Amino acid sequence: MIDHSPSPQATWTSTAKEGELPPPPCYAPWVFMEIHDLFGDKSPEGNVVRVGCLHELGPDGTCQSGSPSSRTACLRRAPCRRTVHLTDGSGLPRAQIREILQAGDEPVLEFDPRSNPSDSTLFETAHLLRKLRNTGIDVTVAGLSVAQKAKLGRMEWKR
């Protein structure tokens, strides 16, 4: 990722589990990624914003701007993989996927191995995969048969 920080002292910190390290002395929240139409239906629920943190310390170690806040992922260091369980016929749980992405984590889309997902669910999943992979976000799909994975792969790269 390119660092577009406003000062030489500012550095980018990526995201991980809260509570592992004490909060940084200061930061300025920064929107570093905006994803539009995540689900491919032009719905506003497909717009996701990920927030990062710029640390701005002066030469003496004092905070130049910003202060810690629990609303951002600043306390975290690396993305966590979080599982989204997909049930047959219910489509993608959009709110859960958005929450995972906004938290800076990586989704694992887990289908029930006994299910046979509909073409519309596979198409929605394919659009989501293509969008996330093109933005550099790691996403995993589990629980599909070889034939379903092949179909999903064809759908993903068809458009």
Image: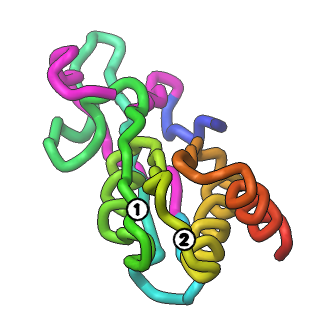
Residue 157 x/y as whole percent: 83, 65
Figure check: 47 above or below 43: above
The picture places residue 49, in percent across and down from the top left corner, at 42, 62
Q: Please give the label number shown on residue 117.
A: 2
Image-quadrant location for residue 41: bottom right
Which residue sits at x=42%, y=33%?
79
Scheme of image coloration: rainbow
Q: Is disc 1 placed on a helix, strand or loop?
A: strand
Locate the N terminus by quadrant. Answer: top right
Image spot of residue 138 (x, y percent)? 58, 42
As drawn, the label of residue 5 is none
Res. 130 image quadrant: bottom right
Label 2 element class? loop
Say whether residue 2 is left or right of residue 159: left
Above/below status of 138 relative to 14: below
* Residue reaching furthest to the bottom: 42
| Disc 1 residue type (three-letter) | Leu
Q: Main secondary structure of the magenta part?
A: loop
- The magenta region covers 8-34
Pointer 2 local density, CA inside 10 Å: few below 14, some 14–19, many at least 20:
many
128 within the magenta span: no
**Mark 1 sits on what residue?**
86
Q: Which residue shows up at 46% across the image and 74% down it?
A: 47
Mark 2–mark 1 CB contact (< 8 Å): yes
Amino acid type shown at disc 2: Pro
Residue 53, horizontal then vertical, whole percent: 37, 38
Q: Residue at x 52, y 63 (%)?
A: 34
Quick check: is 27 in the magenta stretch?
Answer: yes
The residue positioned 21% from the left and 15% from the top of the image is 21
Q: Could you say which is closer to the camera, residue 5 or residue 39?
A: 39
